[in-house]
Image: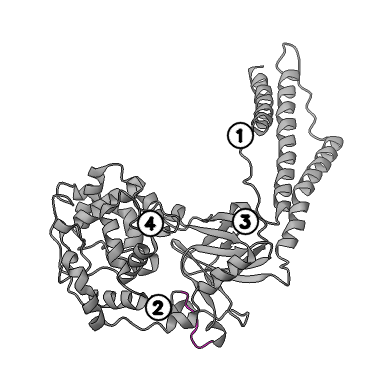
Amino acid sequence: MAIAVVLIVLVIGSVIFHFAVQAEGLGWWFTPIASNWSEMDGTVILTFWVTGIVFVALNLFMAYAVIKYRHKKGQKADYEPESTRLEIILTVVTSIGVVAMLAPGLVVWGKFVTVPEDAAIVEAVGQQWHWSFRFPGEDGELGTTDARLITPENPFGVNPDDPNGQDDVLVSHPELHLPIDRPVKVLLRSKDVLHDFAVPQFRVKMDLVPGMITFLWFTPTKLGRYEIMCEELCGMAHHAMRGRVVVDEASTFDAWLADQPTFAETQAVAAGDPAQGQALYALCTACHGQQGEGMQLLNAPKLAGQEPGYLRRQMHNYRNGVRGTNEQDVYGRQMVPFAQSLADDAAINNVIAYIQTLPSEPTEPTEQGGLGGDAERGKSLYTTCAACHGANGEGIWSQNAPALKDMSDWDLVRQLQNFSSGVRGSHAQDFYGAQMAVMATALVNDQTIKDLVAYINTL
């Protein structure tokens, strides 16, 4: 009897809980939809009703059977191995339930794979742990790509010999803009492992499979900003692989797209000139040193030996207000006017080209850095960091991760503290800083940070 009571209470409690929380708006329900795929919701809701009815019926039947056929003295069970009537009922009821769940899904899937002829095209490229995007140019066709062509100068792997690719519009950061009420077909390509492109408000998702081009389509129906997530476990920082879709009015989208570079424009950028960069670097020497060795007394970290892509990104961040605007980032705020003294991208490239010529000498551990930390404990903590920054802290350009080895350990401590406290990584456009802020939550206190930096000093 106790089991029967538990089953009945379970059913009643589940039903009351479901409808009560929905009435109060507290239910675990869908995010508000922002695309044309309301049929996805209808299909899922129908599945909930079918499985919910089965849940209630099955558990109440079990409770009924326990009560009716419980043990009684002198009562003997009647063994009936075959029941044609019961088998027919179960087969019919089960078939109805299965059809009710599967048939709508097949109808929706048919629409899902039938892309409207007027749908715009955009390619979403996934890699550990980053999104980037490519639009066809004026010719309306995307150029061919090849993973073997991927370099720091050609991160999309676009074939330079394909004329269709010259006007392709490249979006190298994880923010994708789309026009409202215009269907779009998203081609999905992975550079490395399985990923999954998902925007909860759009209700559609699809895997990115290495060596294949998959796709999905939808029509954005509400202006706003929506988070892109990877819903396929893709490695250590899978949970931090976030991007953003911004749904704009058509005119706003057109203006944004016009500001993005084409493949031909990115390939036409002249390589940095170290000679010109040396003259520009003269302003940097006062703090960062003649050889880019850094000066702790002036709170200026070492630059020599740093990954050039990271230096370029940080200079842009200072110039664009992504970094150095937080009131608590005292030393970052000092960098802003110096970054703005570099007139354009060519000047930034020249300075970085000169910095790359400077010798990178190992730095000495400091009291504010790794001294006092437990390197052995830090070694286990660094396992997470190695996924992006490399086993030897060398930095990996394709993962937008700077070098850590031989850098100023006191600055590493400060920046990890800044990420942990929200001083860095909180700006809406600082996608990689936001990733670091998430990863830094594993460092629970300053001692843990020092332990990690103590191990980095041994690399």
Q: Which of marks 3 and 2 is in front?
A: 3
| Colour mapping | one colour
Query: The N terminus is located in which quarter?
Result: top right
Residue at numbered disc 2: 153
Q: Distance between the residues labelled 1 and 2?
A: 49 Å
For the record, the magenta segment spans 156-162
Q: Nearer the viewer, residue 237 or 130?
A: 130
Query: The C terminus is located in which quarter?
Result: bottom left
Residue at numbered disc 4: 433
Q: Nearer the viewer, residue 104 or 58?
A: 104
State the image quarter where residue 107 is shown. Answer: bottom right
Q: Which of marks 1 and 3 is nearer the N terminus?
A: 1
On the rendered structure, is 281 left or right of 34?
left
Q: Which of marks 1 and 3 is in front?
A: 3
Q: Which of marks 3 and 2 is nearer the N terminus?
A: 2
| Mark 2 surroundings within 10 Å by alpha-carbon count, few (fewer than 14), some (14 through 19), many (20 or more) | few
Does the magenta-highlighted stretch encompass residue 160?
yes
On the rendered structure, is 185 left or right of 111?
left
Q: Position of residue 61 (x, y in %)?
A: 74, 27
Q: Where is residue 359 in the image (x, y as percent from the top left)?
A: 17, 74
Q: Which of marks 4 and 3 is nearer the N terminus?
A: 3
Please name the predominant secondary structure of the magenta segment in the image: loop
Which mark is on residue 223? Answer: 3
Residue at numbered disc 1: 26
